[in-house]
Image (cartoon, rainbow, N blue to C red):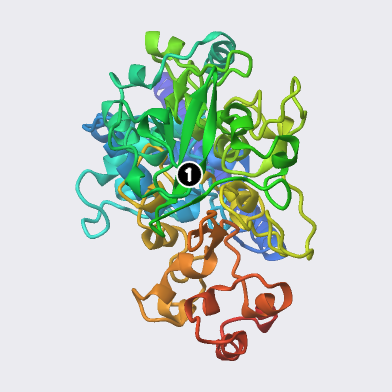
Amino acid sequence: MGERRGIQFCSARHRLGGVNFGMKVWKSLVLSIALIVVAGAIVAVLLIERGFRATSEPSAAEGFLARTIRNLAIPHRAKEEKNPLEPSSRNLQDGEELFLAKCGNCHGHDGSGLTPMGTSLYPRVPDLRSPQTQNLTDGEIHYIIENGVQLTGMPAWGNPHQMQNGDSWKLVLFIRCLRPLGNTERAQEAQTAASARYAGSQACEKCHAEIYAHCKKTPMANVVRDPREHPDAIIPDLGTNTVFKFSKAQVAFVYGSLWKQRYFTKIGDDYFPLPVQWELANHKWSKYVVPPTGADWWARFYPGDNMHRPTGPLCDGCHSVGYDIHTKQVAEWNVGCERCHGPGSAHVAHPTRGNILNPARMDYVAASDTCIECHSQGQPLSNPIEGRYYDWPVGYQVGLRLQNFWKLEDHTLGEPANFFYYPDGTAHKNRMQGNDFVQSVMYRRGITCFDCHDVHGTGNYAQLREPADKLCLECHGPMSPNGPRTATLEEHTHHKADSTGSQCVACHMPAIETEGPPNTFVHAHTFRFITPAMTDKYMIPNPCTSCHRDKPTSWAEEAMSHWVERSPWRLE
């Protein structure tokens, strides 16, 4: 009897405990729901007060959580995939072109994401150079490109209508190239710059055969040529020359093959230009002597006779690799690999990313300085140097700041056109692309010379990566945030598609900068549109009447006044 009561008592206590436990669970659940509701209400109030907008900056925690979820969502099989493509120059170039065409609007030409589109999306477009991206496997990057990322601006490019088979892997190759040098590599780069020696372009051929083969055919790799090694170097028939007679035996170097051709003779350790040139466009001989005034600044510091104007201080620093002003010797004639990549002996012996300079991994200033050092008109900061006046930046090497060695020719806005500039600051003569470019919006936005040009050589005019119009439209397609802000190119240009007037360079890069001989002009690089009104005010040629030569500027102004998508203020 007592035992039964004990059992009943224990059973009752157990039931009572179960009830209490159930109550606690319900209370905890209700409390949790209440807390969630309260938290949701607080978030809702904050959102109402602050607004739900893409301009808000995601928190570090939110960014970490989003990346973690994204990475966890990538299937294990996809993570383990290896890139089937070799990092050949062709695949890397294809990858770069795809990147600029498909990804550049958001990620920028350098992968930084610092573009109008990239900084306006929520979440922000990632910096592809950062460890968060570079630490992903090739398979993870490929999966993201192919499938996109939900609830972000990242589209899926795996659709066969969007990209061809293998294109995503080419993009992976290019994205890998965006990785900046690490601290160890930076230290190695600095050490190499201080101790490496010139090895010569031919030493690069073993590992970079395709690039080397293209490069050897470029005009820059053939600025000066020895006619004994290159029998075809002299273009005209010397027998037709009645301006200043000379023989082939007198010619040590032939200079130029595009606009004009000049001839250097050697006396002692120096080379001197003969006082005659062949004008390629005009098929005629003409005198070549720089006058003492109204032309190159250095002319007043040298005698008027060309035989007293050596090419060493006036030319050779840009037409060679490693010109030594003391010995007058060069490491290599012409623009060889090491002109842009620095001395390569350490890299040839043990190739790494850290023991060779690469302008593509430099900031936009140092990167473009590599080209501007010779594609500009200016003067060394210290001149004369050991009694001689130099027309190139003595002491500068790739990777340094050009401004510490070189001063661009000065200009005062509005002053009449002179040898160097038009009144608006646009260059007036050749070899001034750098003077133009540093004034441009493109330069201020971090665009570099080799975003458009491939110095290693292409089949396009001026070694452009793509034909000019295709190249421009990679970043400036219809309705692009970079402009033009019209639905079609024809609406922007007011010319028929594929016509001369519909070419981007016709209006934004007019050929108005003289190469010297008559009828030889190169393109401006300010990318400004020169209006007909500016022709009337400043006597600078505009693209409209430069093409429509039979029309006055008033005709062009009247025609453009009907272009309703244009601000009238920009036409003055």
> How far across and down, in percent of the image, does residue 447 sit?
55, 48
Is residue 488 visible in the rendered image? The answer is: no
Q: Nearer the viewer, residue 527 or 153?
A: 527
Residue at 57% across, 43% down: 375
Q: In the rendered image of this protein, does residue 107 appear above or below residue 384?
A: below
Residue at 28% across, 33% down: 231
Is residue 28 visible in the rendered image? The answer is: yes
Residue at 35% across, 50% down: 240
Amino acid under disc 1 = Phe
Q: Quadrant of the N terminus?
A: top left
Q: Mark 1 sits on what residue?
A: 244
Q: Give the image quarter of residue 513.
A: bottom right
> How far across and down, in percent of the image, does residue 13 sit?
50, 30
Q: In the rendered image of this protein, does residue 403 appear above or below residue 350?
A: below
Secondary element type, mark 1: loop
Q: In the rendered image of this protein, does residue 118 appear above or below residue 251?
A: below
> How far across and down, in percent of the image, does residue 572 sit?
70, 80
Q: Is residue 191 left or right of residue 173?
A: right
